[in-house]
Amino acid sequence: MGSQTSGKHLPANATVPDSFRNPGKKEMAIRPLAKADIPRVVDLYWRYMRHREGSAPADLRQLFHRLYFENPWVDSAYPSLVYEGKSGEVIGFLGIIPRKMSMFGESVRVAFGGNFIVQPGSRSQLAGPRLLGTYLGGNYEVWQTDSANDISRKLLERLGFRTIPTLNLHWIRPLRPNQYAVYVATRGSKGPLSSILRGAAKPFCSFGDILASRLPVSPFHQKQPRLHGSELNVETLLQCLTEFRKGYSYWAEYDVTSLNWLLNFMDRGTTRGRLRKLIVRDKKDKIVGWYMYYVKPGSVGEVVQVGGDKKFAKDILHHFFHDAWQQGVIGLHGVLDRRWMADFSDMGCLFTCRGGWNVAFSRNSELLDLLERGDAFLTRLDGEWCLDPGD
């Protein structure tokens, strides 16, 4: 959830004022997103979230339409929201994607909020708080985002949201250590100097990484995995999600239709790269795990999901890291399931807390406690991170 608003207009306590919940006056003008709003909403997104000049591309409008009007969870009772100015123009937007979860086998409706945009200016100072207030007035069991930036995280915490520590622990696994070091050193840097540095360092880094992958004593040594993998289809993934969530109290609900739509949306060709999905089996051809990640050769692979039989955790990770290395990825970034923490650590991973932040609000304290103690099988597949329109 990105934001261009300021937190100074929010109430200091954790209660949402009635005026936020009931935006009936003309000057507040909060209403459901309509299809005709898409061009203006995309322009706001293009300019204030992507910081781009000029008109947004036409295919981005189609993507927003697909995301907010064609997703398998769309429900007119739970719409995304726009904020209208006095002259009727859209100056604020909050995208809402309802997701179906299960808690102890009982259905739970979660509202994932994202693409939170407000046009800067004095006339839109109340738009952010009022959009959030209307969002919190919806009929959900949980309100959540898994990609809040620092600004929106502070806004949400002042409205009573909790930052969930167990869902904000990320793991890092360098695969080509020299190239990864250059990536870290130049990340966020723009201009000719960083490009020159990357170009000059590449041949030396490549040579050093080849040595690191071949030396048996190296932590980056690549050896053949014991498990074997093959392409993961929707039906098999659904089977895995059902079988390997045992022992968890909370999980996302899918069927073939919703899972197929989601994977197609994610694999449309984004700046993250190409979505790769593999199932892994033991020597008896029994399914023991799976993983999904974005492949972008020469860059970091963002991990969507990894799971399976805990007894095979290290073998699954070994197969995963070897596959990513073969695909030309320099390192992997993912969100940690704390039950696998020791296995990730043993496989040479590093850990960090960083955004986008996973924050949640619920009037059911038991549900929030469940999330905080790591009793939820939730991954990047199950929120709004995987629905990022990209650019």
Image: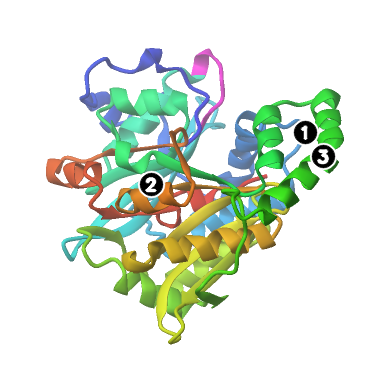
Residue 119 in magenta stretch? yes
Q: Secondary structure at mark 1?
A: loop
Tell me which amino acid carries mark 2: Phe
Mark 3 lies on residue: 204
Q: Which of the 4 image quadrants contains residue 259?
A: bottom left
Mark 2 lies on residue: 112
Mark 1 lies on residue: 54
* Quadrant of the drawing holding the C terminus: top right
Spatial CA span between label 1 and label 2:
29 Å
Residue 192 in magenta stretch? no
Q: Earlier in the sequence, mark 3 or mark 2?
A: 2
Q: Which residues are magenta?
A: 117-123
Vertical relation: 156 (above or below) 103:
above
Spatial CA span between label 3 and label 2:
44 Å
Number of labels in the image equals 3
Q: Earlier in the sequence, mark 1 or mark 3?
A: 1
Spatial CA span between label 1 and label 3:
40 Å
Other residues around mark 1 within 10 Å, as few (<14) / some (14–19) / many (≥20): few
Q: Position of residue 123 (x, y in %)?
A: 51, 17
Instruction: Please give the label number shown on residue 17.
Output: none
Asked if one can make out residue 290 in the rendered structure from this viewpoint, the answer is yes
Asked if one can make out residue 70 in the rendered structure from this viewpoint, the answer is no
Q: Residue at x 23, y 41 (%)?
A: 372
Q: Residue at x 39, y 62 (%)?
A: 313
Q: Nearer the viewer, mark 3 or mark 2?
A: 3
